[in-house]
Amino acid sequence: MTTLARLQAELGSIVSTDPTDLAAVREDKSGWVAAGIPLAVVRATTTEQVQATLRIASETGTPVVTRGAGTGLAGGACGTDGSIVLSVAGMNRILEIRPEDELAVVEPGVINQDLNDALAAYGLWFAPDPASKAICSIGGNIATNAGGLLCVKYGVTREAVLALTVVLADGRLLKTGHRTVKGVTGYDLTALLTGSEGTLGVIVEATVRVRAITPGEVVTLGAVFPDVASAAAASAAVIAARVRPAVMELIDPVALAMIADYLGPDGSAGLPIEGGAFLLLQTDGPAALAEADQAAAVLRSSGGQVRQSTDPASGERLLAIRRSAHPALAAYGEVLIEDVSVPRSRMAEMFERIAEISARTGVPIPTVAHAGDGNLHPNFVIPIDPLRRIGDPMVPDHIWAAADELFRAALALGGTLTGEHGVGVLKRRWLAEEIGDTSLELQRRIKAVFDPLGILGPDTMFGG
Amino acid sequence: MTTLARLQAELGSIVSTDPTDLAAVREDKSGWVAAGIPLAVVRATTTEQVQATLRIASETGTPVVTRGAGTGLAGGACGTDGSIVLSVAGMNRILEIRPEDELAVVEPGVINQDLNDALAAYGLWFAPDPASKAICSIGGNIATNAGGLLCVKYGVTREAVLALTVVLADGRLLKTGHRTVKGVTGYDLTALLTGSEGTLGVIVEATVRVRAITPGEVVTLGAVFPDVASAAAASAAVIAARVRPAVMELIDPVALAMIADYLGPDGSAGLPIEGGAFLLLQTDGPAALAEADQAAAVLRSSGGQVRQSTDPASGERLLAIRRSAHPALAAYGEVLIEDVSVPRSRMAEMFERIAEISARTGVPIPTVAHAGDGNLHPNFVIPIDPLRRIGDPMVPDHIWAAADELFRAALALGGTLTGEHGVGVLKRRWLAEEIGDTSLELQRRIKAVFDPLGILGPDTMFGG
């Protein structure tokens, strides 16, 4: 019996080989499309189905690509040729909310915003907030250790994961972590699995930490600077003044010009965003206003034109400038979002390197940054080629050459390839350069402990 | 050439076989004394010396016990028979402080308080604050993923570790993590090593995250309740009211009576602590006073007699009640501190279980708790036996039997064996019961990836 016949015999109608389904799971939000055709899509709704799928995959040596909402930005959930794409999008129940213990238990397919909507009734929220929170799933947040706009104050996804239930490559169930706030019994497999991008097991349940909604108002500042260097210096000065913003986002002049075009004059929230660099800052909590005043003073003395807003509507208009970055860029072509991170103090230098690389290669690199974290998203906008066929590479060689220079520049500044998106397929060729041979060897061997046959996400992280 | 001769030939005077030195490293602050005599103590001051020691250990198959300040509470740093005790206490330099990047780079032997003293000049601090912060080292904080009084608001040690340099069992150097705030390239080996209790490698350098000293005043509340159940319920009610205290500590009536004896009438800070249970609460930050008022109202409506203090001296007197717990108990005998953690909502039940176990076994179990975290420290006070010889078990069988009941009760309530002290030697017999066979097998195999000969801390966690 073939692998497909076994899947169909054991799992029935949740196994699809519909060509439309198979095509849809070959891509994610990075623009990457995997070569070849997956064997099948299995749409699991129970842990037992995940176990059955992995048992069959193990017995037949078939690669498995786990997929949630498909909003990844590194190609890690793209169904590769001949693989079983195991979709957990349908495992989307919120199993428990325990206000007294400040935790929730969820299935992996629960959408981040849906959990937050359910928590709001209890005065609680789930802090990890990737830009895609309206459409991304908690399982994917955990698999990539997702970041977002608020981690400068509220931490990354790892800090919000207490316990996991994971199906191993051979179908066995592993439980890690605890429902308690603290716990140090044995190795921290919960943290090891967080950010492992589907290469160590399939998350089927997560116990996440939730927190009280921050009391007090949110104050939003938008500031325009003549150039990116002064905006970067201003953001560093805010941190150096020991202000802890909840959000601090920077948009460079190249990206800002594209956003200004996209939003039109009415969308600029009263700021002259058609020239210069933009810094968006939010403070929250009981001292939000005092902190915002302090930050505004720092921004002004760093050369910024500052607009402050305490009412939600005008704050939202300022935030919309940042939120428009991706659609504004996408109006010009396919967007390849990079994700380097550097120590905060090196951010201005990283912007210089980006400008140099852009000038030398002739490739525009509009860049936005989580400035509070030193996490930059340089973007490559690739004009849509009507002649490109499915399977043709989206990213031309000269763009990869520019990206290569970008990664090396980040590493040279003491930075990292990826602050929050993951290695996936798109960055694996630089992995060894960052982590070194000793770490790579240990990581491959850890992978083999969990997945001796190497069937889980074989093209992700170490593969290919 | 013997192992000892090789150590002496290669490392010279940093190798000690002085019987006083060998005796001193057999114990830690748990009261545990390892059986037998270590082979030697190596007092490393450089990474190269650590590498040389581990190369010799690997080539000769000699066990290595890494030791910092020796303040552990689970026996993990106690030199076992025939082992090399590798002391990194002398690697105590602060290598960098980078205020703009909010990080510091330290050697493992740096004392927690010394780092904080150095950071204070920059308006910064290192948040992990075990009760032993005046005498414990950062390397040990990381090896145990130490907690403390402030983790309810500021997180555990894991959240403060950005990068590690580790010597592997074979002497190779491994670098993990990054100097950036965020970074997800590859598996999170930094988190895996944090809390691994010296069983995966020897930390020789750590890049830690530091943070701005919280502005505003600190407000301290001390509250006395008629019994531990009402105090536990009050602490849960504070969290349920969505107040986020920086410190929330509970002392049960058995411990409080011993502390009252120890402090005498002048030490009670104006509270009738000679009867009942005590809850200590601190709020900090710009809204400290408002949060304290809110918490005080909750405590009063839960039946507490509350005393509030905003001046540092009287706040310190309230805190001294909690700080006196260990010396007060130690006045009665050797103290075996347990460290179970349960979901906050089950804390009152855990106190009931402790009382039942104490009543049934006739063993007094004075208990203090980090109530904001649900982390309880039930203590067994063992009368000092003048006839006990070195090597004799400190903990009599009937105490272990009571401890065994305690651990099972915590696990049954969805809790964990150890919230912050680690498994070490003292809790390894319950490890499998908590984590299960699948996790145990994976963890042993991860251990083998890092330490194939099993020479690092062979009696710790999995060993024995």
Image (spheres, coloured by chain):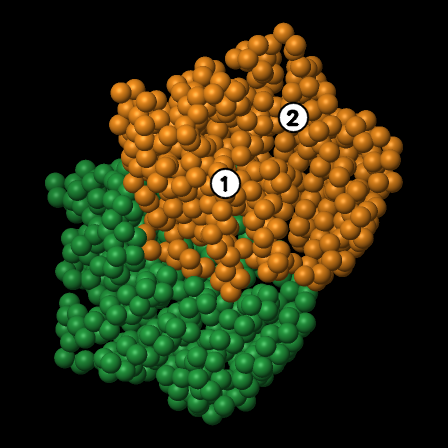
Chain colours: A orange, B green
Residue A276 location in percent, x, y? 81, 32
The quadrant of the rendering that contains the C terminus of chain A is top left
Amino acid at the residue labelled 1: Gly
Q: Residue at x 26, y 27 (%)?
A: A59
- Write down the quadrant of residue A378 in the picture: top right
SS at badge 2: strand
- Within 10 Å of disc 1 (Cα), the crowding (few <14, some 14-19, many 20+) is many
Residue B289's place in the image compared with A417, above or below, is below
Amino acid at the residue labelled 2: Asn
Q: CA distance from mark 2 to mark 1?
A: 28 Å
Q: Residue at x 80, y 53 (%)?
A: A310
SS at badge 1: loop
Residue wearing tag 2: A379
Which of A261/B33 is in front?
Answer: A261
Viewed as shown, does residue A133 lie left or right of B359? Answer: right
Work out which residue is located at the far bottom of the displayed protein and give it: B265
